[in-house]
Amino acid sequence: MTLSFGREICGHLSSAEQREWLVTNDLGGYACGTVAGMLTRHYHGLLVAALQPPVERVFLLAKLDEQVEYGRQRYDLSCDRKSDGSVTSGFRLIEHFTLKGTTPAWTFACADAQLEKQIWMQPGANTTYVRYTLKRAQAPLTLRLTALVNYRDHGAETTAGDWPGQTETMTNGLKFTAHQQATPLYLLSTEAKAIPTGDWRRGYRLAIARDRGLPPSDDHYAAGDFEARLEPGSSVTLVASTEPQPELSGDWARRDRDLHERQLLERWQKFSPQPEPPNWIAQLVLAADQFIVYRPLAGGESGQTVIAGYPWFTDWGRDTMIALPGLTLATGRPDIAHTLLKTFAQYLDRGMLPNVFPDVGETPIYNTVDAILWYFEAVRTYYSATQDKALLETLFPALDEVIDWHRRGTRYNIHLDPKDHLIYAGEAGVQLTWMDAKVDDWVVTPRIGKPVEISALWHNALLCMVQFSEILGKSPEPYQQMAEQTQKGFQRFWNPAKGYCYDLLDTPDGNDDSLRPNQIFALSLTLNAQSSLLTPEQKRAIVDVCAQQLLTSYGLRSLAPNHRDYHSHYIGDRYQRDGAYHQGTVWGWLIGPFIDAHYQVYQDRRLALSFLQPMADHLSGGCIGNLSEIFDGEAPHQPRGTYAQAWTVAEVLRTWTQLQQRSRPQ
């Protein structure tokens, strides 16, 4: 799979610095940056190591300042924006950018010389390789690299002098240690001469950080220089690692990465419902793999989990369960789904799954009403794909206990109301649904009461239990009875005056008739569709109003534009951004349930597929080869938030796969 740009993108700073790239290592560590080579976030760097996978992510290598001497001329390949506003313009020398699989590559043109730069990480290790190859030249070329290092949390900032820093010479390179308790960084090369230095470089201006109301600049430490003479056709590789003796050539790590990606695509193509699936879907299969990482469990077992989004999220219960069908089943990897379901089952407690997945030895945080309900749907889709009765049998008692906890009541006043058989949830100061923005003590969208999607998910969970009971030879009657009661009570959500569903019932201030996308789940969940929580007329009305007021090219707005609390742009400081997060901001993952609902109402497969085309186009913008978390509510819908989001990728994959599996129109 290849995505590429020429000078029409690379040669213009406004376009090249807005396009980002991402490389990962299966542990939660990563490297990332812009096509221009300019740092615009605190997270941009060549090695962000996950010291306690998949967390404790430490920013170690910011960048390599690159200079070339060729034909008696000096070329500066670096691109920086300094605090005084000055810009070094190495981006003008980029002739071509390519993403092959998940490996980014740049071709720099220096007169008639072409110098290629590639970046990849070793799977399962905090090790990054940067390789320079002289593809074309009349004579040798001299390459000089200055390693700009750091030592901090990957989202923090550094001020010159924050730690003393020490660079030591060692075989094949340098060892940098920020302070006595710091994990050392090894900078190694068998082809380049290493020279320790040790001075601070100040004032790297970070445009995106500034726009997000964060500290607008950062300082880095020049740990050492590397110099190599390249003959035409030869290469030099620099290795950055937390391991003192990594594989130096990088060839094994590159072959391992290429083989892994080739096997991913071969496995998926055997599973794919289309004999020759489009290239953009294949690229998403590779993107999906970047979110699946290892996580050690209590007792020393090896588990797996899902990074919700790069660069700053870790693993979340809700996000994992929503993303599971798309990341694993739609890509032909049910074994990963099996591991994820078993991993999270270990943390079921009082009928709930953790919101934030705990580090080993830490207490889980259970402030989510919907993660466990999405777990039922994940189990259902897994069984549908695998017919794995053994896992279903193992999980069934715990799932039955979940239903019982909701009937009795559990944390945060989450309980089934016996009057209308809908789920009530919420306490002051706590955010429980996916609309969970909170700044200090301010819960932006508290949604205390009966959220429409929670009762839809509850009804779906009951129908799952009916199905599971029948498969396992148990009586489905208790679950069937509860499902019928909830189905009857669900009509309370219908607002005939507005022609769509209330978003919330029985809040402290009454019923909330804000037009939000949450009602779409009453249609999109497969088992709900089969049992009809809503009448055909109500379904069509919901799809139409969402299409007219919430739908954008990249997903659904979280609030209708005519609402008094609507925010058209997600930008500014923390209060401004979180105040807009679920108040009009577009969410990419919602394109999946919208398409499900649209197809259910209109039964037009080709029309439903057309809603995915903008996502295919977005693979060449934002983070190249990946899909963003959120977008501005107003056109042109600038991508915001995390530049690579698991459930956005997952829902596009799941939806495309399901539509391909449906019969073609006559």
Image (cartoon, rainbow, N blue to C red):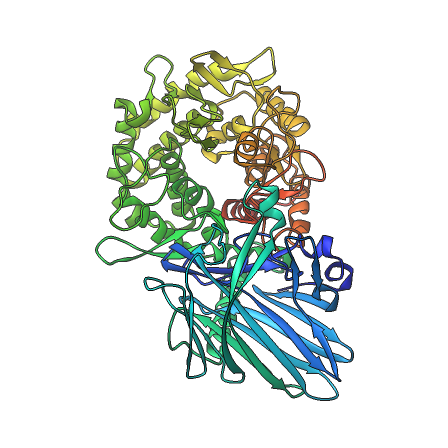
Q: Residue at x 54, y 31 (%)?
A: 582
Instruction: For the N terminus, give its image quadrant.
Output: bottom right
Q: Residue at x 50, y 45 (%)?
A: 647
Say above or below: 237 vs 354. Answer: below
Q: Toward the viewer: 525 or 476? A: 525
In this rendered view, identify the residue nearer to me: 648 or 134.
134
The answer to whether any part of residue 41 appears in the image is yes
Residue 399, image x, y percentages:
29, 36
- Horizontally, residue 46 falls left or right of residue 362, namely right
Please state the horizontal and vertical placement of residue 18, each as a whole percent of the image: 66, 52
- How far from the left and from the top, in percent, is residue 142? 65, 83
Which residue is drawn at the image coordinates 64% and 37% (left, top)? 632
The quarter of the image holding the C terminus is top right
Residue 477 visible within the image: no
On the picture, is 552 further left or further right than 526?
Answer: right
Up the image or down, 161 lies above or below 316; here it is below
| Count of numbered circles in the view | 0
Outermost left residue:
299
- Is 473 located above or below residue 182 in the figure? above
Q: Which residue is drawn at the image coordinates 38% and 14% (left, top)?
A: 420
From the viewer's side, name the closer residue of 657 and 567.
567
Left of 289 or right of it: where is 484? left
Residue 462 image offset from top left, x and y in percent? 36, 30
Q: Nearer the viewer, residue 606 or 642?
A: 642
